[in-house]
Structures are given as structure tokens and as C-alpha cells.
Amino acid sequence: MLRFIYVIFMNLFRAPYMITRMRYEADHVEKFTEQERYKLVRHVIYLMKKSGRITTECFGENHLPKSGGYVMYPNHQGKYDALGIISTHQEPCSLVMDEKKSHTILVSEFVDLCQGKRMKKDDVRQALRIINDVATDVAQGKKYILFPEGGYEFNNKNKVCDFKAGSFKCAVKAKAPIVPVALINSYKVFNSFHLGKITTQVRYLKPLYYEEYKDMKTQQIAALVKQRIEEEISCVLGT
């Protein structure tokens, strides 16, 4: 939390220009390509990382499918998670986010630049519509980040909570690859009292392709993806 305040303070001099530019591009998608808007998002993340003394290492990028859409399912640790993934993911991708947390300044600009989906967790019909919209986008070649835990604990120390089976329905509907993503020490960036330089890891694991999971229930898929992420984190940390 202290680092978040520090990063905001260190970027106050450029914030008016950058936020205005982000808002303009987000509101005029007809004038800017997806690649141009994604480049701006990554540039802003770069500035945040540089001023906050944050390093994010990437592993397993070769596991990402070379073509077509897919859904990335990471463990959830805090406010930096999606930023860390986007900073290492070369191709434009989008995300699904809790609607209640998506309207603050800067966060709103990030979501809109990526044309992300805002999900109302307490509205079943709206959530189902979002899942269907994501499935349609993924079937058409778009990449998404979706956090199957649905939330996170403050200072969670790399703990992985249960995955919600419903979050995997969009990948199943799209018959798309499921990419487990293991995040390590991401919580230390904005969701702990850790100070000083910090290094986080984004580890893309081998994807599950439709032929591998088509006969599985979403509960089984959720359990398998969670298991693979937990095993990766345990192997890296030696726990």
C-alpha cells in the first residue's frame, strides 16, 4: 500500500497528461488501433515499474499459443497482478474485472483502453452475459485475463485460494486454450508493507487445449488449473 502511494506521488508531474491521453484514446477507439492502445497501457505500466523500483520476470512465454484466442487464468494476489501480466504479454490482451473496483481513476482508463469487461458479482444475469461476451471475443481470436479466485487477501504470501468453476465457462464455450499463469510475489508490490526493490514473477504454464479438457466438468478444470499453479509456485519457492 505504501508503494502504491509512493508510485502515485512520483508520477504526479506526468499524471495529468498521461491520464488525459489514456482517457482520450479509450473514448476514441475508432482513432486508435488495438495495438496502439495496448502500447500506451504498457508504457504507463513501465513508468510505474520504473518509479516504484519494480522488476517483473517472465518465464514460459513459449507456452503461449502462437495463434488464436485464449484465456489466461492466474492466481490472484493484488492490484499489480494484471499489470504484471500485461507488462510481459507482448500481444494485446484484455481482462475481466470486478465492476465495483473498476471505476477509480487510472484503473478505469486501463480497463477501457484494453476494452475489458466489468463483471457485477452480485448480478447473475449480467455475469452470465459477460461470460458469453468473453467467449465470443475469444472465439474470434482475442486474449483475456480472468482471475478464477475472484478476489484476494491482503499480504497473501503466495497462497492460492479455491478457483470458481464458473470462471472457466467462457473458455469452454469458446473451445479455447486455457493458460494457467503462476504469479509469485506480486502481492508485495501494492498489497503488503514491503519496501525497497521488489522482483515479481509471471510464469506462463503449458496450456490446456480443448481436446484435453472437453470431457471434464468445469469443477475438474478449475481444480486441475489450481493444482498446476500451486505446484509451480511450490517448486519455485521450495515450499
Image (cartoon, rainbow, N blue to C red):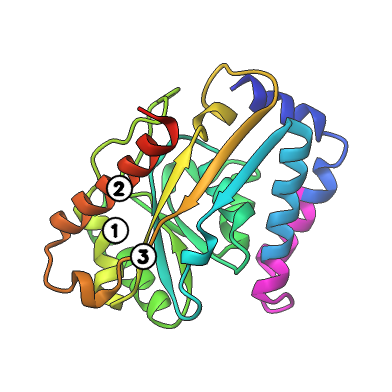
* Label located before the other in sequence (3 or 2): 2
List x then y, in percent, for residue 186: 52, 35
Quadrant of the image containing the N terminus: top right
Residue 187 vs residue 200, the one in the foreground: 200
Are discs 2 and 1 less than 8 Å apart at CB? Answer: yes
For the stretch drawn in magenta, the main secondary structure is helix
Q: Residue 207 has which mark?
A: 3
Helix, strand or loop under label 1: helix
Residue at (52% x, 47% y) in the render: 202
Residue at (40% x, 40% y) in the render: 76
Helix, strand or loop under label 2: loop
List x then y, in percent, for residue 136: 36, 78
In terms of image quadrants, where is residue 47? top right
Task: State the residue position of label 2.
Answer: 121
Magenta stretch in the rendered image: 19-37
Q: CA distance from mark 3 to mark 2?
A: 27 Å
Q: Is residue 115 left or right of residue 43?
A: left
Q: Nearer the viewer, mark 1 or mark 3?
A: 3
Q: Is residue 24 magenta?
A: yes
List x then y, in percent, for residue 100: 43, 42
Whether residue 27 is visible here, answered yes or no, is yes
Q: Is residue 217 magenta?
A: no
Whether residue 116 is visible here, answered yes or no, is no
List x then y, in percent, for residue 142: 48, 74
- Count of numbered labels shown in the rendering: 3
* Label located before the other in sequence (1 or 3): 1
92 w.r.t. 151: above or below: below
Q: CA distance from mark 1 to mark 3?
A: 25 Å
**Amino acid type shown at disc 3:** Pro
